Image: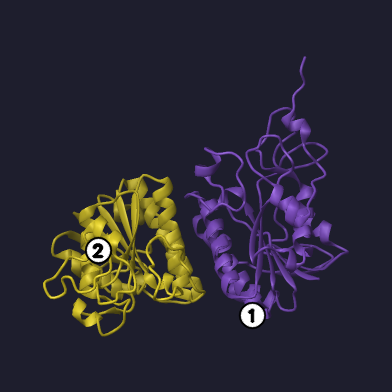
Chain colours: A yellow, B purple
Amino acid sequence: MKLLVTSANSRLGQIAGKALSATHDVTLTDLPQFAAAGDGVVANDLNHDEAMDDLVTGMDVVIFPGIESHTGDASWLIDHHTRRSYNVLRACVDAGVPHAIYLSTLQLLDDYEERLTVSERWRPLPSTEDEILAVHLGEYVFREYAREEPISTTILRLGFPIIDGDRAGAESVGSAAVATDDVGLAINATVEAGGDGYRLLHIQSPVPNARYLLGNAELAIGFPEQKESLAGEGAAR
Amino acid sequence: MKILILGGNGMLGPPVIDNLSGRHELRITDINELETEHDYRQVDVSNLEQVVDAAEGMDAIVNLSVLRPHRQIAFDVNTRGNYNMAIAAKTHGIRRLINTGPHFQLAGRNYEEFNFELTPDMPPQPGTRLYAITKALGQEILKVFSEHEDIYVQTLLFYNFYDAETLSAPNGGPRIGTDLTPFSVSWTDAAQAIRCALELPFAKLPSRCETYYIFTDLPHQKFDNSKTRAQLGWRPRHFLEGVWTKPIA
């Protein structure tokens, strides 16, 4: 499939790009201030213009990293996650791109106590912290596009912290952690599963006493794929 | 009460200023220059520093600013403008924020085209129209701040405004017997709703974030303004009957 990853030089953009490149035709793009000449990343402001339209034309899926993307002050973050995501989605709709994925965070549900069975059915409780608020608004934009436009959107709320490596490393970090291997796995599985209207999925590594339920992700995209070393070891359902 | 008005030279600004003058101490701001007897500052609502500076010493902020068609500026004004208002309130300990917008920032097409008896306590479904979603995102920012700070947000939603005597809407002549968008109100009644919200004791608010539909009593039963009457004590004086009735031969 032909895929576009925005904010490709951010941490999560790099994780997504690396995970998808082996099996898909991936175009990487980033804002001009983050795209160096010759790094294989297309510089684009994600503005409402022809360059934006050209960028998404012919794509099957667009991946928009929300959390652990580029940082800035609150004004910059709100602008990026609302206006730029709106521009990307509008261009996708106009170009007939069928599916867009937003990479959000389970920190939106951090205020719930650990003992609660928090799933996608629980209302997010965003804080006023700049990045969390901005990502919450990014989800809002993706949700409204799925509601009203001919495009499917999937929001992957990723665990925290996001740690480098495989899921074995996530166990020692925290009950909500997600390993980069699992992030890549989940993004790949979401791409392969295709869009289905509006989907909201919680993604964390299946560590013992995992904080968030992963039943919806398992049903929708087959995540977490069972690995021998962890099969049956406390993966939340 | 010392009140900061953002977007004071917009559509709703003049009648609101007329209504509040003499009862409250007003600081008027707008992105454009404005001649007024009140304290005036030129403020771009999308500029955080300007909004925070303008709010110093105020007891309440009324946001009447709006920008509809331009992709960049709509987000700057309608979305980030509300963030700036929230930060100004937090910075200066201002507890009362009056926000305004169009009804479809809450009751978007998926509600309005399909349903009746729509209330202001439904979850927002603005859809993707630029004006609607940018305003809805701004509202969401204020809601999040109201859940974490000692800030009371009252959002008043409007749509069509009419001159009560001529039954003319903006940019148009009288609309006798043509029916109307069932979310219409006279300019003076709209301004009175702002005053009702400003002067309502906090103790009478059910929560720190409340939304109200501001339209006159109409027979369509498309929307429901009973919450506005019950909580704000607002009573429209103009019912615009000439627009929604027709002569029978």
- Residue located beneath label 1 in the image: B91
User: Given the current orientation, which residue lies at the most extreme left position?
Assistant: A228
Q: Which structural element holds mark 2?
A: helix
The answer to whether residue A115 is visible is yes
Q: In 3D space, how far apart are the residues under numbered discs 2 and 1 (Cα atoms)?
A: 40 Å
Quadrant holding the N terminus of chain B: bottom right
Q: Does the residue at mark 2 contact the one at mark 1 (Cβ under 8 Å)?
A: no
Residue B82, image quadrant? bottom right
Classify 10 Å Cα crowding around label 2: few (below 14), some (14-19), many (20 and above): many
Residue B60, image quadrant? bottom right
The answer to whether residue A48 is visible is no
Residue plotted at (51% across, 72% down): A75
- Residue located beneath label 2 in the image: A187
Please give left or right for residue A43 compared with residue B41 in the image. left
Q: Nearer the viewer, residue A76 or B59?
A: B59
User: Mark 2: which amino acid?
Assistant: Ile
**Vertical position of residue B150 compared to residue B242: above or below:** below
The spot of residue B79 in percent (x, y) is: 55, 62
The spot of residue B107 in percent (x, y) is: 56, 47
Classify 10 Å Cα crowding around label 1: few (below 14), some (14-19), many (20 and above): few
